[in-house]
Amino acid sequence: MIRSSMVAAFVASLTLSTGVLAGGGHGAHWGYEGPEGPEHWAELSKEYATCGTGTRQSPIDIPAAISAKLPVIKFDFEHATLEILNNGHTIQVNHDEDSSITVSGEQFDLLQFHFHTPSENTVGGKHHDMELHMVHKSAKGQLAVVGVFMEAGKKNEVLSNIWEHMPANAGDKKKVSSVRIHPADLLPADRSYSRFNGSLTTPPCSEGVKWFVMTNPIEVSAEQVKRFAKAISENNRPTQPLNGRFVLTEP
Ligand SMILES: [Zn+2]
């Protein structure tokens, strides 16, 4: 059963995937190196101005943070048929089932998840091999991203399922009815996290995004990291100044 709010969320996810993440369609073209690289995003289009003028930008280097008792994130995720796209900037899996997180009584519906290599957020200046971003939106339009670091180690079976259907060319999208993905399978068992306010990490770099970055990484194989890097290349925006923002981390 698909609620009407989920239909709205799915439409929003399409907007996110074609507008925000792909930078295609009506948005100016952007990339990760050269004249279209992150240091030039703000110059590429008026719509991307926040990439240059924003003061609460993502990603960040997560510092030795202030220990705080943070609210538990309640994950209510469901299996969904794999819908996967290569938007030229990342590999994205759209999610149109009734999945959500709830934090302090506020519910955010899962729209899509996608990947970066190396990680965008760093910890004490160090990158992990990859980072997964689960993008959520509340009924009020508030965005919340759950970040999960991925570290080379054991092969990840869920990721194998996804990578097997990775579209080779930018702009390709497919639905694989034989594959069902449960996004919770990509979460670490221990769900302590760091909390800060930030932005989208791709143009237009809109602020007001709630970030929840899991402290513990999940494992993927070195081959799985390589496979992604070969398809997409490095797609991490450099870390941005904190400008006095607090980062709270569970002890
Ligand atoms: Zn991302």
Image (spheres, rainbow, N blue to C red):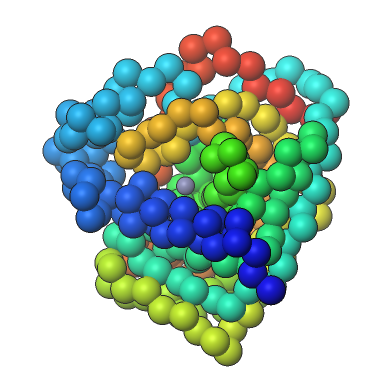
Q: Is residue 207 visible?
A: yes
Residue 21 in picture, x, y percent from top left: 37, 50
Residue furthest out toward the bottom = 178
Against 149, residue 227 (above or below) is below
Residue 138 in picture, x, y percent from top left: 62, 43
Whether residue 217 sits left or right of residue 43 in the image: it is right
* Residue at the image position 54 percent from the left and 76 percent from the top: 82
* Residue at the image position 79 percent from the left and 34 percent from the top: 104
Residue 44 in picture, x, y percent from top left: 17, 35
Whether residue 36 sits left or right of residue 118 in the image: it is left
Against 228, residue 1 (above or below) is below
* Residue at the image position 29 percent from the left and 60 percent from the top: 88
* Residue at the image position 58 percent from the left and 89 percent from the top: 178
Q: Quadrant of the N terminus?
A: bottom right
> Which residue is nearer to you in this view: 225 or 164?
164
Residue furthest out toward the front = 4
Residue furthest out toward the top = 244
Residue 176 in picture, x, y percent from top left: 50, 84
